[in-house]
Structure formats: structure tokens, C-alpha cells
Image (cartoon, coloured by chain):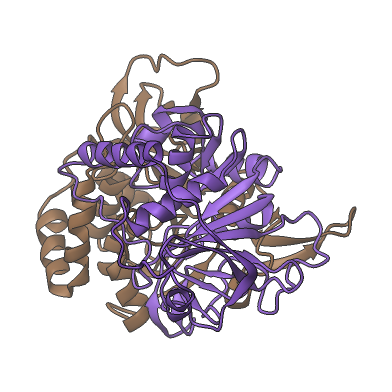
Amino acid sequence: MSDATTTRPYTAAEMMTVTASRALSNGSTCFVGIGLPSEASNLARLTHAPEVVLIYESGTLQTKPDVLPLSIGDGELCETALTTVGVPEMFRYWLQGGHVDVGFLGTAQIDRYCNLNTTLIGDYREPKVRLPGGGGAPEIATSAREVFVTVKHSKRTFVEAVDFVTTVGFGRDGTARDGVPNIGRGPTRVISDLCVMKPDPETKELVVVSLHPGVTRQQVQEATGWEIRFADTLESTPEPDETELTILRELKARTDRHHAGDQAGERVDDQADEGAKA
Amino acid sequence: MAEFLSLRDAVARYVEDGATLAMEGFTHLIPFAAGHEVIRQRKRDLTLIRMTPDLLYDQMIGAGCAKRLIFSWGGNPGVGSLHRLRDAVEKGYPHPIEIFEHSHAAMACAFEAGAAGLPLAVLRGYVGSDLPKVNSQIQFIECPFSGERLAAVPSVRPDVGIVHAQRADRQGNVLVEGIIGVQKEVVLAAGRSIVTVEGIVDDLDVGPNACVIPGWAIDAISVAERGAYPSYAHGYYPRDNAFYKAWDAIARDREAFDTWLQDHVFNRGDAS
């Protein structure tokens, strides 16, 4: 734990992506958000979960993109999909109809009870910063059987209470899902570049269950906007293996080459002033 | 029956000031050529409806066409914010804009309900979200059979719907291929519909389950080659991601935007 300065053969971002990818089990059906969730989901598909079914809200079912999409509706997603359906069918039949195991989301803000904000910073009628909005996330978070969130750790992102609940985790007091019929379990894990968090089974408050190698409790606390709890038996997140790192780097290099000249590959979905594609 | 019109004539005939206008295309087949024609004709006080108001509505809002926006995700995909939309929402420039904000699921259901001629759409949605607190168009109803609490939103039935598609045949039947979004729903939900196409062919040459919109369900068809550029048309041309990236700097600056608008929209007439 004292080796924060140790040089490791992977970056914090790679640690996050690999950890997020490992959360997806083979054969599960995953409704994928753009950006970090998309990177992690495709890494899972290319490593331990070749049978994972990836669904994007543009209507692309069981897609196997060779390069990561820049937008939720890239032609690559359609060309490599089993089939492409209309957007009403996507949300009504496939998501609301109960065919999605995991919703994999990013966010601009997340709070103690795992509520997500991609709408705005400040007051709704007089926003300081207007973000893109909910997109598919509000219903992905309630119709999928469970939700994974992956987002970079910072005080700007991990706030005590989100300015606006775009997408419910467990509500302002942790009870938003109680007694609601036909609703998923909600967020079951949050993967950042520092640690893995899970909601407390009773209170639904986010608890750090695993620290990434070399990361200290203090680092996590300093990047979190509330006094975050740590599990009694705090684990160390397993490091990425060589295969995962190689495949991830190849995927990213392929993606960069594919979009070379596009210049649109710069991802800003971890920045609160630009907002995340849900 | 679809009438073949120039884009200039189609927009002049069907898009009136104050109209509700839905221009769709879910990151694909975005009707940029038609939107630019709306800007050139200086249409005003429009209620703009679109699930993903990306660059096209950023341009139309910046040009002062809109008084209201109904949407579910307003960003520049893969890049960041829509700065003209933000300027309108945050600073009231060029004038204030009223927004009605939804989720994708609700908007998709609302388009489908509009196509079905219903007044409302019902979905299992918005549980725990703050969106119903800020959008009076989101209400909750009780299912008369199960008692389940469900979300209800008004259907989308715009005065005019505009979409872009790959091609039409000489009878005006239109083929939409690839990511089809809500293209068919918009045409059927709208009072009047305009479809721009890459070209006209003798035979659509498609299988029995292709997404074909019959010519008799469309009001006007206009040929607009590369009419979805800088978005893409599956099978015709790719998305110009460099433009989406470049748009960020153009849209951040009011003057740069005005210059762009002058050079790329006003100084370019309808080619058709």
C-alpha cells in the first residue's frame, strides 16, 4: 500500500477499464453506454466473455464492433450487429420487456446513493453548466436487472448529493426502489480508476470494497465529496494480466487508426463541464 | 401521394412560422440539408422536436429559428456540449428557449404513439428521476388492470416531420436502411412530412421486411445528395467526425458561428 510511486506496467485508466470489463460475465446481455462502458464491454467480449451480448440504444442488437464507436450510432455498430431494430422497439421490447441483464453507464456526477446526474450543474432553470441530459439512462437504470457504473474518481464527479437526479440509483435517502414493482436491483458496483464500490445491502450507501493496487484510502477519500465508508475486509483489486492489456491496447490502437484524421476521438465523458453520454 | 418538390419549395410550402417540427435521424441520416433550408428561409418561433438535438439543432437554435425544444439528449456525440443550445438555455442568446426534457425511452414511445394516432404514450419510466419535477409533460397514471404506476407523456404529433433516407423510387416509396431510429414513426406521426433522399431509382430492390415508407404516406420528397452530411448515410458516405470535432470551436464563439452560418448556409442556396 505504500508503493504509490511504484511504476506499474499499466495506467490507472487501464486498471479501471480492465476491472470494469471483468464485471461482465460471459453470456450476459449488456445495454452499453458510450465511452468508458463501451470500452470495458468490448474488452470483456474480446477476452473472458466472448458470448456477451452487447446492445446499444441506437437499435443495434448483439453487435461486435471491431473498433470502438465515437457515437452511439456509428455505422460500425450496425454493420457488425446481428440485427438492427428501430429505437422504439429497442426501448420497449428489448429493454422494458426484460431482456437486459446489465446496464453499463457512465456519468458526470454520482452521489452517495449512486444517483447519476448528466443533466446540469446548478439550478434547473438557471444552470451553471448545461449537460446533455438523460438519453437512455433513466430507464436503462430501472429496467436492466442490475447496473454497473464506471467513472473516473474526482471530487467534482463524486459529490455528496447530485445537483439533479437524472437517473436513479437509490434516491436521495436510499429507498427509491423499495416497493416499486418490476424494477431492477439498481447499481451493484461502481468502478473508478482508484477503487471498486458497492452499495451497502441495507442502507444502499456506496462503500469501497476494493482498492486498486497502490491506491490508498486517503487518495480515495480526497477524491470523494463525502466521507466515504470502507468495507471491514477491504480487498485489493487484481491487476490486469498481460493478455487483457495487450488486447485493450490493440483495440485502442485500432480505434485510433480507424478514426485517424477524424480527430473526434478525444473522449470527454469524464468531465463534468462537458457531460457524459449515458 | 408523395410529390417530388425541390427542397426550397417543400420547406416553403409546409414549414410555417410557429410550427412544431420534428427532424429525426438517430445519429444517422440527420436531415442537415433540410435544416439548412429552414434556416435560409428564416423560419421563426418553431417548436423543435428531436431525441438527439445534435449539430443540426445547435445550428437552427443559434440561427434563431426555435422558441421551444423537446428532446432527450442534447450533445455533440463523442465531442461534448452543444454550445449554441447552451448559450440559448444559459444566457437566452439569441433569445430564450423553453425546453421540455425527456428520456429516450419516453421520446421513442411518444413518437410511436403519435404514429399510432394516440394522445399519449405509456411506459415504465422515470422512476426516481427528477425529470418529472421539471417537465410538466411527464405525468404518472395507474394501470386500470394491474394498479401499477406508469409514466405517461403526450404523444408527438408534429405539424411537420422531416427525415432523410437513402433512396426513393419513382412512385415516391422510400427505403430507410441501417440505424432506422424513429424515421418511420416521425413520418406517420406528422401532419405533413418531407423526406429528403440521396437519389431516385427505378426499383428499391429490397427484401420483404425492409423499412420502406410508402409514397402515399409521404407529402413531399426532395432529392438532397449528401443531404445528411456531416452525419452519414449507410451505404453512401461515412460520418465526417472531423467536422463534429471542428464544430466545437465554431459553436463556442458567437461571431465564429455567425461567420460559419453566413458562409455555409446563407451563401449556399438550395442546390436542388
Q: Would you identify the image quadrant in which residue A147 lies?
A: bottom right
Using residue B246 as the reference point, say whether residue A156 is left or right of it.
right
Q: Nearer the viewer, residue B160 or A252?
A: A252
Q: Is residue B120 visible?
A: no
What colour do you see for chain A?
purple
Q: Is residue A164 above or below residue A107?
A: below
Q: Quadrant of the N terminus of chain A?
A: bottom left
Q: Would you identify the image quadrant in which residue A164 lies?
A: bottom right
Using residue B163 as the reference point, say whether residue A221 is left or right of it.
right
Q: Is residue A22 above or below residue A267?
A: above
Q: Which residue occupies the extreme front position in the image?
A: A2
What colour do you see for chain B?
brown
Q: How far from the left and from the top, in percent, is residue B139?
A: 70, 68
Q: Is residue B86 above or below residue B71?
A: below
Q: Nearer the viewer, residue B147 or B65?
A: B147
Q: Residue at x 64, y 49 (%)?
A: B113
State how many labels appear: 0
Q: How far from the left and from the top, in percent, is residue A143?
A: 68, 52
Q: How far from the left and from the top, in percent, is residue B214?
A: 49, 28
Using residue A62 as the reference point, say whether residue B28 is left or right of it.
left
Q: How far from the left and from the top, in percent, is residue A168?
A: 63, 67
Q: Is residue B65 visible?
A: yes
Using residue B110 as the reference point, say whether residue A67 is left or right of it.
left
